Structure formats: structure tokens, C-alpha cells
């Protein structure tokens, strides 16, 4: 199975320009994908382009990861409902550095096998008049307005600023610059980037008389229509300081059967026969969640390493495998050794005096407000020390503390908090 056939089987190809497959079969090719530096960490939505670059490198091609230090100052309008907040240069450079460190974990940059570039390096020396003279004249307004991403914004109530309108020219120039300076002939990215990517191939054709190619991967969605990569806590980040390896593992472990069957092909390097075997075993006994467990294990090792996976498995074992056992069976070492869950300090004096559960949940930040805490307590969604609490007036006292200092709080089925009461 060649590279494109494998990517198609995995569900990682949506649009592909004629000639792209032939180019990748013909010779080792430099292929670039851009990463948006709106934060100092990538999140799991960025895993698909990262995995595409890894697949390309394994197939003998040269990945070029572009971190958009310049384009990050503009804001990509592609299928956004409104213009985003623009970041200052210092913040952008901080974000670029963080993303560089992450990408270096996944790609082999030794001996020129891959390359990291920042488009700020070539844009910082270009003045406005030079750009509109040397680049703008090659792409017509009619061509730019025909892009779906631009047309949707023009038809919206918010409209589109000139800043965002020029984004496709700037991204197109990235491709042109990489074509001229890095012999880069292919660009890949998410399907929302198709309009920007094809502007680059058009600029290469018109300005350099060259031929370039492109393909995109679909944007990942959950089967139930909710946004991929979002949890109650927000984005699932690749940075362990933002999303712990335990929380990362739990995200994949809690995938639905339908999502897990799709995701294990996209997000792992397991071959077709292995995946078919796992899916068959899972369907034979869905309760064992073999599919979700393998998916979670593969992804956690890929992003965080084997040691962090083992810690995540240990925490999962303590919290869920023996969930029917009383919380008192957990030792101090067990509780303090729980890796990755949210740990909160709370004044022991308030527990000693007696505090109602709703106030406790709000004061610890487990819930953003007393109203939300009360609602979930009444709905049976809160447990303390593995005992369900259904009365909002229920008072917590010192006798509730595990080992005279801890409270283990479950918010719904998936969110666990360890509250340490001291002072």
C-alpha cells in the first residue's frame, strides 16, 4: 500500500490536487504544513497534521513544519464566524518557541530529514508596497473572493476586515517562498485550508512558472456532532502542564465505540490487520472497552511516553477499577500518588466547623457557582469519598476526612478531584 492509499484507508485524505499522488511516488519530496501559534502549546486537533508529517517522513519524504509567526499576527478567516484577537509580537514569539519544542518530539530533524521554519523570518523584511507590487498583482480580487471561506464571511453580519482578507495571499506567499528556497512542492493541511493552499499553488504557477501540489485531511468531528478535543475543562492540550497525561489518557478512553473505531485508524500507526483484530475483539465484548484502551494507550505513549502512560494506568486503576471499594481502602500513599487529577487545598477549619456541600464545591472551584453545584448534587452527579451526595444541605465535617486530611470528590462519572484539608 503506497502512502496516499494508506492515508485514504485511515480516513486522512479529503481533497487532493491532480498530480499529487504521482509526485509523491516519483521522488522524495519536501511537504509543508503550517501550525497556528495562537497558544504556546498545540492541542489534539493538531495531532492530525503532526501525524501526516510523521507518515510522510516514514515514507521517505521531508516534512517541513511551518510555525506562523507572521500569519499569527493576521488571523486566518477560514470558516471563523468573527475576527479573532490579534496577539502582540512578544506573545507570538513565546508561542512559536513552545510549538517548536513540541514538534521536535515527533519528527526526526537530524541530518536535514525534517525542517522547522517560521514565516516571520522572511516576512519581517518585506514592506507593504513591495508585497502588493510583487505578490498582489498575480492574484485577482475575483479569485480571492471566490473562496468559500471568504464568501461566507462577506455574507455574514460581521463581514471581513482587509487584514483577514489578505491572509490567503500571505499564506500563498509562504508556499511560494518554500517552493523557491526549500524546493517544497507539496502543501498539506486541514480541509478548512483548501482555499488558502490552492492560492499558493496558483501563485507558484503565475509568479514562478512552476507546478506545486496539495492535499488536505478532514476536520475531525465526534459522532454525536459535538466538537472534537473539547472537554468540560476546555481544550485537550499536548502540553502535560495544561492537560495531564492522566486526563489525556482519559479523553481517549472515554471515546464512544463509533468514534474509537474511526480514531484508532487516524491517530495510531497500527496496521490494518491489527486494527481489524482489535475492532473484532471489541465488538465481541464491548464492555471490556478493548478498543478505547488500546487507542488511549497508543496515543498517550506517542505524546507523553511509556512512563507517563504507566502513571495514568496506575491512577485509573486506583480510581475506577476498584471504584466499588470504600474510599477508606485507599492509603495516604495511594491518594498522594494519584497522578494527573486536579488537587486542591482547602482550609481544614471550615471542615471542622461544618460546611454545606454546595458551598464547599463552589469554594474549592470544583464548580464555578453554587447554582451549578446545587443542580448536579440534586441530580445525583456528585460523590464524596465514593458516597453519592443528593442533599444540597448535607454538611461536611472533620469525621468525613480520609486519613484526617483528604476528601475524594467525583463530579459526574469522569472528573475526580482530591481536596487536601490542612491548616
Image (spheres, grey):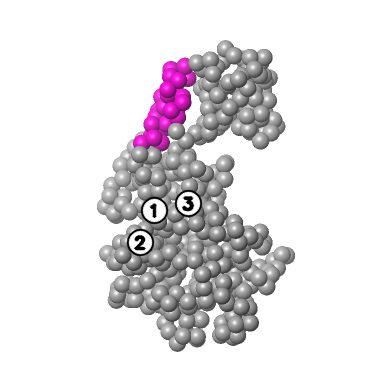
Up-down relation of residue 142 to residue 285 (above or below): below
- Find disc 2 in the rendering and name its residue: 109
Q: Main secondary structure of the magenta part?
A: helix
How many marks can you see? 3
| Residue ID for mark 3 | 44
The tag on residue 105 is 1
The outermost residue toward the top is 399
Q: Residues within 10 Å of mark 2 (few under 14, many from 20)?
A: some
Give the CA distance from mark 1 to mark 2. 10 Å
Vertical relation: 8 (above or below) 195: above
Q: Are marks 1 and 2 in contact (CB under 8 Å)?
A: no
Range of residues picked out in magenta = 310-338
Quarter in which the N terminus is drawn: bottom left
**Residue 92 in the figure: left or right of residue 266:** right
Q: Is residue 72 magenta?
A: no
The image quadrant where one finds the C terminus is: top right
The picture places residue 286, in percent across and down from the top left corner, at 37, 38
Q: Is residue 333 magenta?
A: yes
Instruction: Name the spot of residue 243 as percent of width and height, x first.
Output: 50, 43
Depth check, mark 3 against mark 2: the one in front is 2
> Which residue is at a point 63% across and 14% down the rendered structure image?
352
- Rate crowding at label 1 as few (under 14), some (14 to 19) or many (20 or more) other CA atoms within 10 Å: few
- In three-dimensional space, the C-alpha distance between marks 3 and 2, rounded to whole angstroms, equals 22 Å
Amino acid at each position: 500500500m503506497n502512502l496516499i492509499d494508506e492515508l485514504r484507508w485511515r480516513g486522512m485524505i479529503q481533497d487532493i490536487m491532480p498530480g499529487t499522488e504521482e509526485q509523491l511516488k516519483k521522488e522524495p519530496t519536501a511537504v509543508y504544513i503550517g501550525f497556528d501559534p495562537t497558544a504556546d502549546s498545540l492541542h489534539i486537533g493538531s495531532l492530525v497534521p503532526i501525524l501526516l508529517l510523521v507518515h510522510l517522513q516514514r515514507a521517505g519524504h521531508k516534512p517541513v513544519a511551518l510555525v506562523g509567526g507572521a500569519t499569527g499576527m493576521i488571523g486566518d478567516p477560514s470558516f471563523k464566524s468573527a475576527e479573532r484577537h490579534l496577539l502582540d509580537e512578544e506573545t507570538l514569539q513565546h508561542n512559536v518557541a513552545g510549538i517548536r519544542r513540541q514538534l521536535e518530539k515527533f519528527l526526526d530533524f537530524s541530518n536535514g530529514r525534517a525542517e522547522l521554519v517560521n514565516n516571520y523570518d522572511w516576512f519581517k523584511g518585506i514592506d507593504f508596497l513591495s508585497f502588493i507590487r510583487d505578490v498582489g498583482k498575480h492574484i485577482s480580487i475575483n479569485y480571492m473572493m471566490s473562496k468559500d471561506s471568504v464568501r461566507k464571511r462577506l455574507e455574514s453580519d460581521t463581514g471581513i476586515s482587509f487584514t483577514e482578507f489578505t491572509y490567503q495571499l500571505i499564506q500563498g506567499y509562504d508556499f511560494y517562498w518554500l517552493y523557491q528556497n526549500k524546493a517544497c512542492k507539496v502543501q498539506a493541511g486541514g480541509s478548512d485550508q483548501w482555499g488558502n493552499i490552492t492560492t499558493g499553488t496558483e501563485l507558484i504557477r503565475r509568479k514562478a512558472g512552476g507546478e506545486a501540489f496539495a492535499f488536505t485531511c478532514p476536520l475531525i468531528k465526534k459522532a454525536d456532532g459535538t466538537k472534537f478535543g473539547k472537554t468540560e475543562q476546555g481544550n485537550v492540550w499536548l502540553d502535560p502542564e495544561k492537560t495531564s497525561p492522566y486526563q489525556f489518557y482519559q479523553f481517549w478512553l472515554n471515546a464512544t465505540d463509533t468514534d474509537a473505531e474511526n480514531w484508532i485508524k487516524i491517530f495510531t500507526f497500527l496496521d490494518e490487520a491489527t486494527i481489524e483484530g482489535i475492532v473484532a475483539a471489541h465488538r465481541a465484548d464491548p464492555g471490556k472497552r478493548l478498543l478505547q484502551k488500546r487507542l488511549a494507550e497508543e496515543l498517550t505513549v506517542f505524546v507523553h511516553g511509556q512512563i507517563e502512560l504507566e502513571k495514568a494506568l496506575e491512577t485509573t486503576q486506583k480510581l475506577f477499577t476498584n471504584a466499588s471499594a470504600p474510599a477508606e481502602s485507599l492509603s495516604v500513599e495511594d491518594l498522594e500518588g494519584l497522578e494527573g487529577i486536579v488537587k486542591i487545598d482547602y482550609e481544614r477549619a471550615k471542615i471542622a466547623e461544618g460546611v454545606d456541600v454546595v458551598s464547599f464545591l463552589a469554594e474549592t472551584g470544583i464548580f464555578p457557582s453554587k447554582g451549578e453545584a446545587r443542580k448536579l448534587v440534586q441530580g445525583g452527579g456528585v460523590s464524596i469519598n465514593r458516597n453519592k451526595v443528593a442533599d444540597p444541605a448535607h454538611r461536611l465535617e472533620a469525621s468525613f476526612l480520609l486519613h484526617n486530611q483528604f476528601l475524594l470528590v467525583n463530579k459526574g462519572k469522569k472528573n475526580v478531584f482530591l481536596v487536601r484539608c490542612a491548616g
